[in-house]
Image: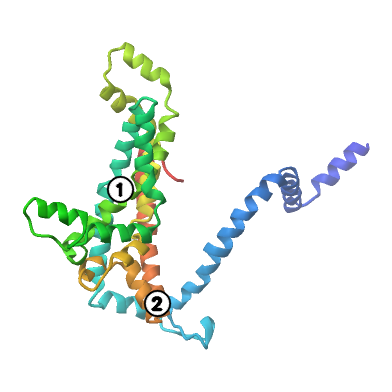
Amino acid sequence: MNSQYSSTNFEKIPKNRKFSRKNFRKLHRNWQLYALLAPALIYFLVFKYYPMYGLQIAFKNFVATKGIWGSEWIGFDHFTRFFDSYYFWRIITNTLELNLYQLALFPVSIIVALSLNELKEGKFKKVAQTITYAPHFISVVVFVGMLVAFLNPLTGIINLFIQLLGFEPINFMTEPGWFKTIFVFSGEWQQLGWGAIIYLAALAGVDPQLHEAARVDGASRLQRIWHINIPGILPTIVILLILNMGNFMTIGFEKVLLMQNDLNLSASEVIQTYVYKSGVLEAQYSYSTAIGLFNSLINFIILITFNRLARRTGTSLW
């Protein structure tokens, strides 16, 4: 009788109350996991989502003394100003060319990882890994300083070698035609080994029995790489490619700014440096916010598009 009474009373409890009790029990049972999640969640809420509140100044004539809410609403005027500006197409072209240039070298780190994976354990492999990993730990400021020293037209080692071959020295850092090549290849050299680490970790998960079976069947090393290793790391390649495409319109701001000068400005001015100059140096906060929002929307659209295309391979972010 008591059991019947308790069951009927439980049935009379509203569904939302049942749901809240069920969630509370799960929370109490797994509180350690939620405690571990809390710092990361707080970080994203404070530093990623809360600043989005300030994006509304892109649609206002922001005046610091009036605050965000007190500033005049002007709609899309800042966007129109940017689209009609003299520098618009030059900035967009430079940004796209640099990113497409970098994207063309995306397979290089995969090739390095496959090559290192084929080396036998020993001193040579350790030395090769150290040489490829070391540049990553050099700060951007020091790295650009090294580039300036190496490419100096009078004392740089590159120009000294060019002169030994009988040619005239080249002022690489001031000629716009050389900027993109120097930026992309130096960046690839600095990040080459570090980018290969992820692929080496993925290669470690490839079943060794597949290679043994392939050897028995008479497969060569190149055939095993093509038919076993590359398919084994293909999901990792797709995920990293999607993440790269999500930052397609974003370039290393510090390095571009450090390499930039008045003589190569026509090739080195990108969206990030233009936002910095407009927002920080010229205090055009609303205008620079509008440009940054436009850039973020383009990245978001590219990310969604490539993630949808990647679903056809069976691998995607969501």
Residue 132 appears left or right of 160: right
Give the residue displayed 27% in from the left and 13% down from the top: 218
Q: Earlier in the sequence, mark 2 or mark 1?
A: 1
Q: How is the image coloured?
A: rainbow
Marker count (numbered)? 2
Give the residue displayed 64% in from the left and 53% down from the top: 38
Q: Is residue 280 above or below residue 192?
A: below
Give the residue displayed 42% in from the left and 39% down from the top: 198
Q: Quadrant of residue 77?
A: bottom left
What crowding class fits label 2: few (fewer than 14 Cα within 10 Å), some (14-19), or many (20 or more)? some
Q: Going by the picture, which residue comes out furthest to the left?
A: 166
What crowding class fits label 1: few (fewer than 14 Cα within 10 Å), some (14-19), or many (20 or more)? some
Q: Is residue 92 above or below residue 82?
A: above
Q: Secondary structure at mark 1?
A: helix
Report the front residue among 311 and 95. Answer: 95
Name the residue type under label 2: Gly
Dots 2, 1 in contact, CB < 8 A = no
Q: Secondary structure at mark 2?
A: helix
Q: Position of residue 301 (x, y in %)?
A: 37, 58
Q: Quadrant of the N terminus?
A: top right
Q: Position of residue 236 (x, y in %)?
A: 40, 38
Q: Is residue 49 above or below residue 184?
A: below
The residue tagged 2 is: 279
The residue tagged 1 is: 189
Give residue 213's mark.
Answer: none
Report the front residue among 91 and 20. Answer: 91
Q: Position of residue 168 (x, y in %)?
A: 8, 59
Name the residue type under label 1: Trp
Residue 45 appears left or right of 208: right
Marks 2 and 1, how far apart at CA: 32 Å
